[in-house]
Image (cartoon, rainbow, N blue to C red):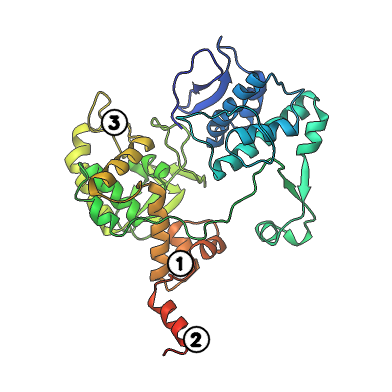
Amino acid sequence: MRSVMVLGDLRVQALKRAGGGRSYTIVWPDGSVDEESDSFLRTYEGRGTQKTYAYYLVDHLRWRVREGLVTESVSLLDLHRYLGAVGARVPMPWGQPWRLPPKRPYSSSALEVLASCLKGFYLHQCALRGVNSELKAALDVRRLPTQVDRDRTLLGHVMTSMPANPLSPRRPARRRHPKMLPEGTRGDLLPVVNTARDEMVVTWLSDTSMRIGGLTGLHLVDLHLRPDARCGECKSPHVHVCHRWGNANQAAAKIKPDWQLIDGVITGGEIYRASPAMVSSYFKYMTCEYAVHAAGHGMLLIQLSGPRRGEPWTADAARGMLRRAGRRAGLPGRIKPQAFRHQFTNDVLDAADGDALVAKAAGNWASMQMVDEVYGHPDLHSPKFDSALRTVWGEQ
């Protein structure tokens, strides 16, 4: 979401912390803090969830003001009406539309996040202030655990129930295979990018499953691009992706494993093997562009032009670069960083002859089962698939 200044209405306010990080709260038009939302958002201090929930919650609070509702009077029916007004399919009239053009209705995944935010917010308020016990009882419900729930939980075989969210929309048929990159994307993008930095971004996204937040949040000390690095955690050239709350460009890794800096050497974090092409593109960028514009902040990706030349490059800027390069290359659709992650995992799984354990380790996925469910199915046009069908049909 792009943050813009909102006057005369509730708005999200970012607060700079002493350590370089940012906190988010919601304020009224006169600048006073909304105490209800602030007490809820403080429970997510130092996490990316705080920013996400702040922007979802401010939209709901604006709608609540229009409807003349407060926490003491909100009902479960009102919350379903709001979900219908922002894009959910609910079997009831929900009144006037809320998200008018150019705003678009929330997607199914956004509605799931919104439902979690609303449930957490109202349960927090009802418990903290001792109000609206009817809404609290309607939201604080449970369900029977599924086999997936049992598999993910320690001592799952003794589970009898799981928390449920009555606001969550019914999930549509899950897309079994995520959206991949168009054929030959890497080869088409590299000739049309404008800088060695952009070439390095395309190469690093193509040769790893790194997320864009982790890539734009890299510091130079995170790179161990020579064999037998002093960290002792990987003999081959590799990169440590470390979650830092106080990056100047607000980029942060999604996964937060422990890491530490000892005697100038990074250990821990997410480790990604670096290909020879990644190392080559890094040295090209460092010698041609970074050495000229570096500002001494220690981050890897920097802006190369404009009034903020030399400052850290943001994740939004990297997404925009990929989008524009895709247009110049004439590629169909919008080129997104996440598609590189899906493509890399799919390619590794194919190269490893379907070994999900290898794909999990190479892509730093949390679960081998998830890799097998999402990526571990044959290509409908593969020779093996075609041969198996023809054998069953008796054509061979």
Q: Is residue 219 left or right of residue 92?
A: left
Mark 3 residue type: Gly
Mark 2 residue type: Val
| Mark 3 → mark 1, Cα distance in angstroms | 38 Å
Can residue 219 be seen?
Answer: no
Q: Which residue is mark 2?
A: 392
Q: Secondary structure at mark 1?
A: helix
Query: Disc number at residue 358?
Result: 1
Residue under the point 57% across and 27% down: 59
Q: Is residue 237 left or right of residue 93?
A: left
Q: Give the percent coordinates (x, y) of residue 385.
A: 44, 77
Which of pointers 3 and 1 lies earlier in the amino acid sequence?
A: 3
Foreground tag (3 vs 1): 1
Q: Secondary structure at mark 2?
A: helix
Mark 1 residue type: Val
Q: Taking 170 as reference, is 244 above or below it?
A: above
Q: Taking 99 as reference, is 155 above or below it?
A: below
Q: Taking 101 as reference, is 31 above or below it?
A: above
Residue under the point 31% across and 60% down: 183
Q: Which residue is mark 3?
A: 296
Foreground of the two, 100 or 247: 100
